[in-house]
Image (tube, rainbow, N blue to C red):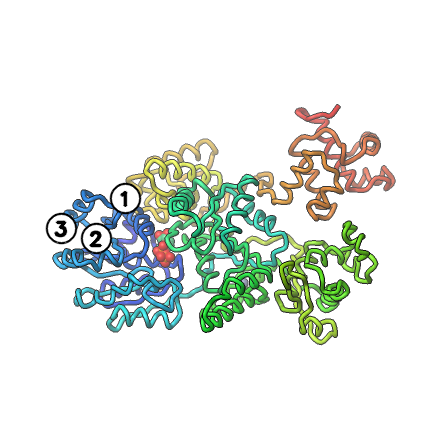
Amino acid sequence: MESCSEVVRKFWGYDELRPLQAEAMQAVVAGRDSLVVLPTGGGKSLCFQAPALCLPGVAVVVSPLISLMKDQVDALVDRGVLAALVNSTLSADERRRVADELRGERVKLLYLSPERLMSERMLHFLQQLQVSFFAIDEAHCISQWGHDFRPEYRMLSVLKESFPHAAIHAYTATATAQVRSEIVRELRLNNPETLVGSFDRPNLVYRASPRVDGFQQICEVIDRHRDESGIVYCIRRADVDALCAKLTAAGHSAAAYHAGMDEAARHASQEAFANEAVKIVVATVAFGMGIDKSNVRYVIHAAAPKSLENYQQESGRAGRDGLEAECCMFYSAADFLTWRKLQQGLPQEALEASIALLAGMERYCSTTDCRHRTIARYFGQDLADGACGACDVCLADVEYVAEPLVLAQKILSCVARLQENYGAGYVGLVLSGSRDQRIMELGHDQLSTYGLLAEHDRRHIRGWIEQLAAQDYLQKVGEYTVLKLTPAGWQVLRGEVVPRLLKPAGRPRREARTAIESWEGVDRELFEELRLLRRRKAEEQGLPPFVVFSDVTLRDLARRRPSTPEAMLAVHGVGQAKCARYGEEFVGAIVEYCRRCDVALDVSPAAAAPRIVEAIDERPATASKLRAWELFTQKVSLDDVCGALDRAPSTVVGYLVEYIERQKIGDPEPWLDRAMFERVRTAAVVAKSGRLKPLFDALEGAVPYDRIRIAVAVLRNLSSPGTTRAD
Ligand code: ADP
Ligand code: ZN
């Protein structure tokens, strides 16, 4: 028999094991019962799949969902592993074939649902074979304390009696001690080896911010991940439908998933997501177990979930392949009200428990500590000190405002002056000194707090109001979520307590450490070409793309650029079966690309330094920039675009200049009047320069810098061919 590490290299192409995988495999090989708790993406499957190939007989895997089973078996077969499943979707013929293969000892892993396994017939059949061990996946389903109790799992309690000599191994991502002991008791595990992994997921970047203009915030995250797969979670079904429609209307490729849809529609959404026919799934918590897709690159929570357990699990669906992935949450005090409302009917005890869970979630939202550490602590684990480099707090996306007390007092006194009768949006407008019609009509421009924060960005003001609400200085009441001061809010007004207020940092967003590392040496253009090839191969075989090759493998291919199938075996995740099946075509594509683009082949990892690309900045445009461009196309004036986007004029002029450059616009109107444009044009001729400072000086300061920037962009277009002229 081969050793586990040989098997892992040969079939999976992995050189290293993840934490606790070796120990878990050891327990299986030794035939000792075990309980393995690893977070989602920790690599639980390999812990039983690899040993199954090293032991005589067939390993029986119990799994709760038919869809999950099929994906796992397909993936194994594609790696050259002898795996099979029996469930209700098989025809009588297919079932007979599997039975024959089992008798002929041509199956190493057999996947079954608990009820199928515990049926009289199946037990009898299996007793005539050599069963190496039982692996119980998602073992927390047996626990009534778990969040996913399945009564059919209880049938497994008698498994030990039926097979006293076969070891039982249980796998779960649910960590609480109560659930763990229930698994051990119910499965009658005999002195099990218990392995509990770290709950931290270092490859995930966590971010959480108050929801201000939710849709735009969501679009900004999606824009950072163009062409990548992501999940957006909402609280209610109606929110899912609305958001999905809005994303689709904005040109995104999205599908909905919630329990109100019929089975077929849900299945279609899930399939489309797995096959990358759609990029985004918008879903309620119902979209969960059974998503095996390893290359989900981001998970957005459009609203706060109801517990940190939920958050950990849902956000954990990102980056299961170990590559960097982003988890962003946009919360609001309204979310917590919604959850309380939804939980109203619960029996007293359950209600108290859920209120406590919600409170934990709220603390996570407004924490000013590292988010990785906050999550780990919640699960009773501690992380080493030092910046994690992978959360908004440690990456310093945000910073504290200099005088939080004064700022908070201005906001709270405005709420008081408005008789605690208005919502956050309106209070924000009054503070910013908006000339909104309603404000004028109601005479609120006469209030002493009117325009008190006029020098600040309107989005920041809204953010601060949400932060004050999240910290309980303000309360949102009633149908119109009118702002009221809480007792703690009055303490702030009296200067007795000082709230924490954050604002986005002025410096540009730093890239997370994990992202920089995992793209090191990867030729991105080649990566994109290989991704298309992977998609085509997947379609041909009716497999999801990530089953053909994971993103990790694809990046390693684009990093090492093997010129022969043999060299390809050194690539992460390429075992012998994959190499035989896909080697020629992928190597062909790589060699062709490298010739065409003059890029080196067969790079060893040490030498795989990043290629220096003299590229223009091709970062995806942000949502607000795209919106601005749309408005420019409609010739909307600068002031109106500033108003519509709630952005500073300098930002909007930046967008405009870029728009003029990209679209080769040759007409400065309506953003610059003709006379002013002609003055700049003349000055440019006289000064023999297109640079801003000399022009500004030549015009003796009569034309502001912003206008000169616009004029110069247009002038540059007029002097180059291919420009759309107005005249
Ligand atoms: P879990 O069931 O714990 O959520 P999986 O078993 O689905 O996690 O594994 C997640 C991903 O990690 C899969 O794509 C799997 O192939 C990959 N993986 C598992 N072990 C390793 C390893 N040692 N090295 C590299 N990738 C691994
Ligand atoms: Zn951190």
**Are there few (<14), some (14-19), or many (20+) residues within 10 Å of tag 2?**
many
Q: Is residue 418 left or right of residue 477?
A: right
Towards the viewer: 247 or 57 = 247
Q: Amino acid at mark 2?
A: Lys
Q: CA distance from mark 2 to mark 1?
A: 16 Å
Q: CA distance from mark 3 to mark 2?
A: 11 Å
Is 296 placed above or below 177 here? above
Q: Residue furthest left?
A: 128
Foreground label between 2 and 1: 2
Q: Are marks 1 and 3 in contact (CB under 8 Å)?
A: no
Q: Residue furthest bottom?
A: 496
Towards the viewer: 350 or 4 = 350
Percent coordinates x, y for residue 610 in the rendering: 50, 45
What residue did someone put label 1 on? 577
Task: Judge whether residue 604 can be spotted in this image.
Answer: no
Looking at the image, tell me whether mark 2 or mark 1 is earlier in sequence order: 2
Looking at the image, tell me whether mark 1 or mark 3 is earlier in sequence order: 3
Percent coordinates x, y for residue 625 in the rendering: 64, 42
- Determine whether the residue tagged by mark 3 lies in a helix, strand or loop: helix
- Determine whether the residue tagged by mark 2 lies in a helix, strand or loop: loop
What residue did someone put label 3 on? 103
Q: Residue at x 47, y 46 (%)?
A: 256
Q: CA distance from mark 1 to mark 3?
A: 24 Å
Foreground label between 3 and 2: 3
The quadrant of the picture occupied by the C terminus is: top right
What residue did someone put label 2 on? 108
Q: Residue at x 29, y 64 (%)?
A: 170
Q: Residue at x 34, y 64 (%)?
A: 140
